[in-house]
Image (spheres, rainbow, N blue to C red):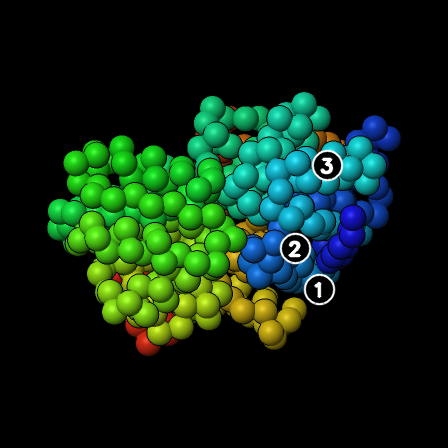
Amino acid sequence: MKIIRNTAAAMLVTALGIGAAPAEQKGVTDDTVTVGAFLPIQSGLAAGAAQVRGGGNAYFDHINKQGGVNGRKIEWITENDSYNPQEAVSVARSMIDRTGILAFVGTLGTVTNLAVLPLIEQKKVPLIGAIAGHPDLLEPTSPYVFGILPSGDKVGAKMARYVRDDLNAQRIAVAYQNDPFGKSPLEGLTAELGEDQIVAEVSFEPGDIDLTGQVTALQNADPDVVVLLGIAKPLALLLKTAAQRGWSPKFVAHPLATDPIFAELGGDAIEGTDVIYMVSLPDSEKVASVNEILNAYDPDLRPGYFAYQGVAAAMVFVQALERIEGEITTDALLASLEQTRDFETGIYAPISYSKDDHAGADRFGIATWKNGKLEVRQSW
């Protein structure tokens, strides 16, 4: 298995000075703090994984160029999990037992994060900024898991309220990804709407290359609105298939469809698609400074949904480290994270944690794809 190491230097601030870490604390030396991430680098989510990795590296590099703190560099090790739950568990176990990490930061993938959760709790290793929104990651609150995204059921409920209350849809169809990533928002949507307003449900796999049957079933149901729940590639394919058939109902897509990858894959077929968003849009003033950080690290790194989440996970980790007084330990890191209050990333609504709530941001906006760009209709 190929290990991809990405080291960006950053120093760790303490209010009262840092002493030497105890020998038993993995991932901390006098010179470095080592953290890791399992990412679907070789999978249908490869483009998004590359953006997450680029965003995280850009922020750690930015911290280092500012001078860092107290001589410690952050080494962020990323390794491929192929978006496969069993592989993710193997990768995570190796990072904990063999590499020795203080925490996981910015791990991407709902099914993979869920698969690794029992290991996280067994080994007592923090998982910070998980880029996954399944409620089982956050409810009940695990001492070791700190999210940055609203849970999938909350996303689905928001989409339901939008299509029902704002679009006044009476007949709603749903196309969802047949895994926890798609089923979680489906549950929230269904709970909010009830069964009567949903006239059709079709599923697809992340790697499907032909969605003609799904589009036919949706079209035959004659819906007012079609809700799309899945990753960028199949959602773009579904829209292109509908366009080829000359069928153009109102489509409302999952927040992942705000990423430039979705526009690149979907082309003209995404025109007019509404998107529920929870990550700032690239032309927002809120992320102007983040865009500068990304551009300074790699001018070819496109600002958007995935790159921003890599940055945000790194931000949450660093701000927690900055509050640690004395030795950097797992317990000190967890305690500091739970002191996070209204932390502004510019990427999400302000993030707060407490002992009983590790869910992170929970606000949404609405935008529409027009002429290859997103136009905000409602801001969070």
Q: Which of the two labelled residues, at mark 3 and mark 2, occupies the earlier sequence position?
A: 2
Above/below status of 312 relative to 262:
above
- Residue 108, given in percent of the width and then of the height, sits at 57, 47
Residue tagged by mark 1?
A: 65
Residue 328 in the image: state x and y as whole percent: 73, 35
Name the residue carrying label 3. Answer: 90
Give the residue drawn at x 39%, y 56%.
Answer: 211
For the residue labelled by badge 2, is the local secondary structure a helix, a strand or a loop?
A: loop
Q: Nearer the viewer, residue 362 or 262?
A: 262
Identify residue type, mark 2.
Gln
* Amino acid of disc 1: Lys
Q: Say what amino acid the circle numbered 3 marks.
A: Ser
Q: Would residue 92 appear left or right of 256 to someone viewing this image?
A: right
Check the image and report above or below for 166 versus 358: below
Earlier-in-chain disc, 3 versus 1: 1
Which residue is tagged 2? 42
Structural distance between the alpha carbons of marks 3 and 1: 34 Å
The answer to which of 337 and 176 lies nearer the viewer is 176
Mark 1, secondary structure of its residue: helix
* Front: mark 1 or 2: 2
At horizontal 21% and vertical 37% (from top left) the residue drawn is 193
| Circle 3: element type | helix
Q: Is residue 65 left or right of residue 21?
A: left
Dot 1 crowding, Cα within 10 Å, few <14, some 14–19, many 20+:
few
